[in-house]
């Protein structure tokens, strides 16, 4: 099966402390990969390493994406190649209009792909359509980016950005945290609609709940900065019963 | 812009008591009664104006330069400065202009003919703007609006000048205001008659021709009862000047139900990364809300000068009058800005609003200094102040000094202040969406300044936004 991303012997540090200690992971095209693990296992650090967050210094190893080692690329260069992360805590940027931000991001991507930019009217048509599909309030697009948004609105706004930018590789970083069941369902529905057999998802989560709504093809258990176990949803069942201690540690 | 390009000071020894020849094109360095008489003669002023200048000069001689602002600079030798010079000879073509400046014009989208005018290149006399100016002045005259240089106004409207000049900023108000009163070169005079709404933004259309104002600019704007005027000063194009010291004075008077909007974009040469060659800008700007329900709005975007010392203020004398101050000040390189406002509440139910956005990058030092003073008479007065600072990098500084004095028990004063760094998380969020680092910084800064930029007249706002981007280029990291 075709690999979307191949992570080889990845070592990464935060503030000089090694967190990732040789991650090996294949993420297959069109599949949903759930990544679980106790606190401190390196889940967030792994996702930061993939998107090029400046906090993480990769000291060894490779991240091969679409045949290219992306370690060392700027965050925006990775984004333009189709990597998208839905943030656990989307940051507020006062005074920056949500719609303006989205159009700038989309047109940056279109430029990268050699496409002409969308003008304001064309973009607004696209945006309205997506907003309707997501059941969002229209006024949200005229507000400042994430400013004063509720937890649910912030997560939906992440999904809206994903819908607009149409990435090939999506990381959902604890997208389920702080969501009530209705919001969780809406977010999950939107993600499921984007499963098209080509797009790859990496879902980082602590809880099984979201995996009932977005069924993973593979589950990976991370511990101590390494991949401890890879399997299907059945390992989550074991996890539910026994906790992480079956993998050698209390949560 | 808004100034004369003058000849470099010729190194000549100045002797006390030296008689200046009226035919000379420039005054030798130094300040004395003779210098002032020379300036006044050159400008063909009446005796009463010369007398006022001399009175200001004598007062200035007894005054001391203020040093309470949070800025440092080497001592200024007032006797080494030349206080009057004829306009500089025009350049032949744009080829003679500093390429750095041309690049900035390009970035700011300034049309070619206007570039020439700004850079001091000789322009064709049939240039559109000249006839445009004549047409507009004619149109304004029909409405009874006076819009001319302060020198013309001294000659043609002595009654208005005698009544209003020094009525808001007394000639001895402060050291720099007194210096300006003694040696002011030129500036703008505006009078809007009762009930007239000025149909255009003043100065936007005229700026090509508004250069002969000099380093000691003086502006006086009077809005009579029920009138409205919007005045734009300066422009985004970078201005270089061999004269390091600038000390302008602006006086505004709003009568009953009148509203004055005063917008400034200041982009004087900031000096190099060590501050060498940068302009010292010591400005006194004050508006008097004389009548009931009058309103004065100051909006400023300050990006230039090495030293900025500037506090556009409002005296809210009329009942229900309103004062507003919206400011964006950016300091980078080795720039130091100490700027803010004073809102003096005297009338009943007077209201004031202060929105100040300070941005510091590189070695820039940015200080907000503001006074809200509520007199006993100002029953029901209200003030709201918001002072936000944004830091880019870790070698710059932001400081906030709000002063509040209230003698009215019924007054309401609110002050909010924040200091933030452009956070890694904000930058990363935008970059993760494919937006490059420089564009991401620009987006965050524009968002930060939005409340102020939205107050500028549209054309001016477009310029201000382009200027912000140009200023931030290379200021990051």
Image: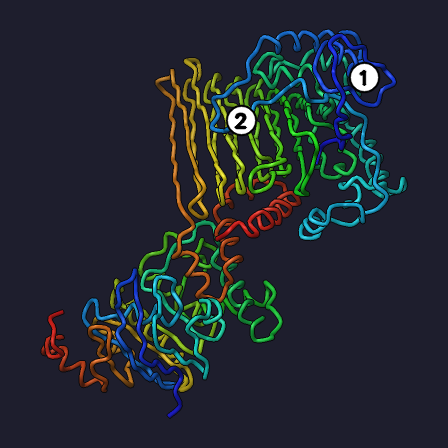
Q: Quadrant of the N terminus of chain B?
A: top right
Q: Secondary structure at mark 1?
A: helix
Q: Quadrant of residue A216?
A: bottom left
Relative depth, front residue between A123 and B245:
B245
Question: Could you tell me residue A232's position as x and y percent?
Answer: 23, 86
Residue tagged 1:
B156
Question: Could you tell me residue A222's position as x and y percent?
Answer: 22, 76
Q: Is residue A19 visible to the viewer in this orientation of the structure?
A: yes
Residue at image position (85%, 15%) is B22
Relative depth, front residue between B370 and A15:
A15
| Direction from residue A117 to residue B7 in the image, left or right | right
Q: Is residue A100 above or below residue B349?
A: below
Q: Is residue A53 above or below residue B161?
A: below
Question: Could you tell me residue B136's position as x and y percent?
Answer: 80, 35
Q: Residue furthest bottom?
A: A1
Q: Quadrant of residue B249?
A: top right
Relative depth, front residue between A136 and A112:
A112
Tell me which chain the residue with mark 2 is part of. B
Question: Could you tell me residue B451's position as x and y percent?
Answer: 50, 43
Tell me which chain the residue with mark 1 is part of. B
Residue tagged 2:
B311
Labels 2, 1: one chain: yes
| Direction from residue B361 to residue A37 in the image, left or right | left
* Residue B435: mark: none
């Amino acid at each position: 099966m075709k690999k979307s991303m191949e992570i080889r012997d990845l070592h990464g540090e935060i503030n000089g402390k090694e967190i990732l200690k040789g991650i090996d992971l294949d993420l297959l095209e069109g599949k949903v990969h759930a990544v679980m693990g106790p606190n401190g296992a390196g889940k967030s650090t792994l996702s930061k390493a993939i998107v090029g967050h400046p906090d993480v210094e990769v000291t060894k190893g490779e991240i091969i994406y679409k045949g290219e080692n992306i370690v060392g690329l700027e965050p925006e260069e990775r984004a333009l190649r189709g990597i998208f992360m839905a943030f656990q805590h989307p940051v507020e940027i006062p005074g920056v209009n949500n719609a303006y931000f989205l159009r700038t991001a989309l047109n940056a991507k279109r430029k990268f792909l050699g496409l002409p930019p969308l003008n304001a009217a064309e973009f607004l048509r696209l945006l309205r359509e997506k907003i309707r599909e997501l059941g969002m309030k229209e006024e949200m697009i005229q507000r400042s980016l994430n400013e004063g948004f509720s937890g649910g609105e912030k997560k939906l706004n992440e999904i809206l950005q994903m819908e607009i930018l149409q990435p090939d590789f999506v990381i959902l970083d604890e997208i389920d945290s702080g969501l009530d069941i209705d919001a969780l369902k809406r977010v999950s529905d939107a993600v499921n609609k984007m499963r098209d057999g080509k797009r790859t998802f990496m879902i980082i989560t602590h809880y099984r709940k979201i995996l009932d709504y977005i069924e993973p093809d593979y589950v990976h258990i991370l511990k101590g900065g390494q991949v401890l176990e890879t399997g299907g949803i059945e390992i989550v069942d074991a996890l539910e019963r026994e906790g992480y201690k079956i993998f050698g540690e209390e949560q | 812009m808004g100034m004369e390009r003058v000849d470099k000071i010729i190194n000549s020894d100045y002797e006390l008591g030296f008689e200046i020849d009226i035919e000379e094109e420039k005054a030798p360095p130094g300040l004395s009664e003779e210098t002032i008489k020379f300036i006044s003669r050159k400008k063909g002023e009446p005796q009463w104006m010369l007398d006022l200048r001399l009175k200001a000069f004598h007062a200035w001689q007894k005054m001391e330069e203020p040093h309470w602002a949070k800025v440092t600079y080497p001592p200024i030798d007032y006797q080494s400065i030349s206080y009057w010079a004829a306009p500089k000879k025009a350049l032949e073509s744009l080829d003679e202009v500093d390429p750095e400046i041309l690049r900035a014009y390009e970035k700011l989208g300034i049309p070619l003919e206007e570039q020439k005018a700004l850079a001091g290149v000789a322009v064709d006399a049939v240039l559109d703007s000249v006839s445009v100016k004549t047409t507009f002045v004619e149109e304004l005259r029909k409405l009874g609006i006076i819009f001319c240089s302060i020198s013309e106004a001294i000659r043609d409207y002595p009654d208005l000048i005698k009544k209003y000049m020094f009525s808001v900023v007394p000639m001895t108000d402060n050291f720099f205001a007194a210096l300006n009163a003694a040696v002011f070169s030129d500036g703008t005079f505006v009078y809007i008659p009762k009930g007239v709404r000025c149909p255009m933004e003043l100065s936007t259309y005229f700026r090509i021709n508004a250069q002969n104002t000099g380093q000691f600019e003086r502006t006086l704007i009077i809005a009579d009862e029920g009138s409205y005027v919007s005045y734009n000063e300066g422009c985004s194009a970078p201005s270089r000047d061999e004269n390091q010291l600038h000390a302008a004075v602006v006086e505004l008077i709003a009568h009953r139900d009148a509203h004055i909007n005063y917008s400034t974009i200041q982009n004087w040469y900031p000096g190099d990364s060590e501050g060498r060659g940068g302009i010292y800008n010591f400005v006194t700007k004050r508006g008097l809300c004389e009548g009931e329900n009058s309103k004065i709005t100051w909006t400023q975007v300050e990006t230039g000068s090495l030293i900025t010392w500037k506090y556009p203020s409002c005296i809210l004398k009329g009942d229900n009058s309103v004062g507003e101050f919206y400011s964006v000040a950016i300091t980078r390189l080795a720039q130091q800005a100490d700027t803010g406002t004073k809102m003096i509440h005297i009338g009943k139910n007077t209201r004031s609003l202060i929105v100040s956005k300070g941005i510091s990058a590189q070695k820039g030092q940015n200080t907000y200094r503001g006074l809200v003073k509520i007199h006993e008479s100002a029953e029901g007065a209200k003030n709201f102040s918001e002072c936000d600072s944004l830091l880019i990098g870790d070698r710059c500084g932001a400081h906030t000094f709000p002063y509040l004095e209230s003698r009215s028990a019924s007054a309401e004063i609110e002050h909010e202040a924040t200091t933030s760094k452009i956070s890694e998380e904000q930058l990363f969020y935008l970059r993760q969406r494919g937006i490059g680092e420089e564009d991401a910084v620009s987006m965050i800064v524009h968002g930060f300044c939005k409340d102020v930029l939205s107050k500028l007249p549209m054309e001016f706002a477009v310029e201000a936004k382009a200027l912000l981007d140009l200023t931030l280029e290379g200021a990051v990291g």
